[in-house]
Amino acid sequence: MENRHRRPDRPGYGGPGHGEPGHGRPRPGGPRPGGPGAPMEKSKDFKGTWSKLLLYCKKYWAAMIISLGAAAIGTVLTLLGPDKISELTKIISEGILTGIDLDAVGKVGCTLVIFYATSWLLSALQHFLMAGVTQNVSKNLRTDISKKINRLPMWYYNKVSTGDVLSRVTNDVDTIAQSLNQSIGTLVSAITLLFGSLFMMLKTDGIMTLTAVLSTIIGFGLMMAIMGKSQKYFFRQQKHLGELNGHIEEIYSGHTVVKAYNGEEMSQKAFDEMNENLRDSGFKAQCLSGMMQPLMGFIGNFGYVAVCIVGALLTMNDKIGFEVIIAFMMYVRYFTQPLSQLAQAAQSLQSAAAAGERVFEFLAAEEMEDESHKTARLTNVKGEVEFDHVKFGYEDSDKILIKDFSAKAKPGQKIAIVGPTGAGKTTMVNLLMRFHEIAGGEIRIDGTPTKDIRREDVHSQFCMVLQDTWLFEGTVRENLVYCTENVSDEKIEKACKAVGLHHFIRTLPHGYDTVLNDQVNLSQGQKQQLTIARAMIADKPMLILDEATSSVDTRTEIQIQNAMDELMKGRTSFVIAHRLSTIKNSDLILVMKDGDIIESGTHEDLLAKNGFYAELYNSQFEQSA
């Protein structure tokens, strides 16, 4: 079902300049930033972003320090194991001829069990604590982003697409969470294991240490060469995946147009080309990546062989004992393992820094002015609205769209705003609702400037019906009532009957309690009727209709128009309409062009002037003739 959202706490508003070109629309083309199929970005300020992230986690520092300490101590205990195994081997080998000291074997064995058991417990504690920290930080980030969304001015959404904001809430926060949960602990363990194993090897034997390190470096030289080759193919794979996903989404959403214009063959050809690109890059990336695991095995085995050969030579010359070879075989594994972990952790930390940069950039975005200090209130609103020399231009643009707009609406009047696309009609309504702040002049409601009133108080005086319908996943009743409290069933049914929707709702499986989801197909006209009924139920002092009947048939439009006429009685109403026949009975018609009022008056007065309005009105009949 189109235009349905799960978030009923946010108005279904299409964005700044809604209904006009270039405003409030997602950016076309390509995968969304940070979304599925998007190439991984690199952080511009790695240290700065991680500093912010660690400061954000400040109240969890104690748990993080304990967790990292547990990881380090557990790793040290693991490193002490080969030394004890070497000692155990020596006791057994020396006692083969003279008799094995079972008490000594038992003591060393018990010590090993204690070391490894304690190491396991500390590792479990580390994972437990970091899992808690990760989930709490993720929850806090999502909460802060959700609150931030409601504090941002509408102009912010002019320059940031919906997909980008959603990506920050989901993908970027998940990336940060995964890095906190896995990479930091892994980084500490890997560093401890790397330097700890190197220290233990040097402590045990210098020549064997040199052998182990050299054999490992040779193997890792090969691995780094392969990683350098595979990186570009992974990048291409993500790029081609994004292109393919975008193509499939576009063709699926527009399948009716594709069929109507016989575009299946062209679409299939484009799909095949993208699919082949993805197959090629994916094959090369996975082939090279698949070599990593065998190569890691080769590095380990190469180290074992080198240690065994050099160790055997040293043993034959009575330089070292057999137990040293046993210990070094384990140290080689401990030395090679953290190198690959460090590479993975570094990549994960870089990804988290890129994600964190996007999240903190969003959280640091300029917010709407705090209005808690404003004391002016609107009570017993009559509905007198005055635009006094209003000027307006979007905050992120130097261009002035509304140059000098003045108009006055008396209580209970029906004010129609007409004009060509892009004239500024919807912008004026947005200014009235304080979705944007004006650059000059004043807008007054009952003589009180709206800039002196809190935004919520201004919003509470209006109910709106927009061109784009907005429904969320819930029952029909919940969609109708929305945020209006204490609404009776009688009032709901009366509104639905007025817009001609009651009969259809009764035919649904559960009537007004039917959940609107993908299984319930509403036509665009029925969605429009539902949102109009919602406005009637809200019953606010003033009403805004932005092409409210644009998606309904002529018969339904007449029925809704009659209901609207009833609804508008005693209310100041602002009606934006392209079909001028629907606003002939308006008390005042404002004709806009290029951001200014060029004509005003009643329908008859404007026709008599034979100006721009008369030209617009007559052109509709010429087109329909």
Image (cartoon, grey):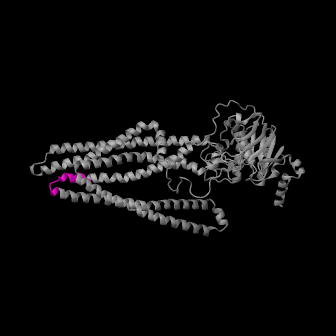
Q: Quadrant of residue 513?
A: top right
Q: Would residue 240 be found to the left or right of residue 293 on screen?
A: right
Q: Quadrant of the C terminus?
A: bottom right
Residue at position x 22%, y 60% from top? 309
Residue at the outermost top position: 375
Residue at the outermost left position: 98
Residue 21 lies, with reference to residue 230, above or below; the image says: above
Q: Nearer the viewer, residue 428 or 500?
A: 428
One can see residue 509 in this view: no
Q: Would residue 587 be found to the left or right of residue 170 on screen?
A: right
Residue 621 lies, with reference to residue 442, above or below; the image says: below
Percent position of residue 583, x then y = 81, 48
Residue 105 lies, with reference to residue 210, above or below; the image says: above
Give the magenta range: 315-329
Percent position of residue 410, x then y = 82, 38
Q: Would residue 552 be found to the left or right of residue 286 on screen?
A: right
One can see residue 415 in this view: yes
Q: Would residue 149 be found to the left or right of residue 52 on screen?
A: right
Residue at the outermost right position: 608
The total number of labels drawn is 0
Q: Magenta stretch: dominant SS?
A: helix
Percent position of residue 33, x then y = 55, 53
Assess whether residue 318 is covered by the magenta stretch. yes
Assess whether residue 283 is covered by the magenta stretch. no
Residue at position x 44%, y 45% from top? 180
Residue at position x 84%, y 60% from top? 622
Percent position of residue 61, x then y = 43, 37
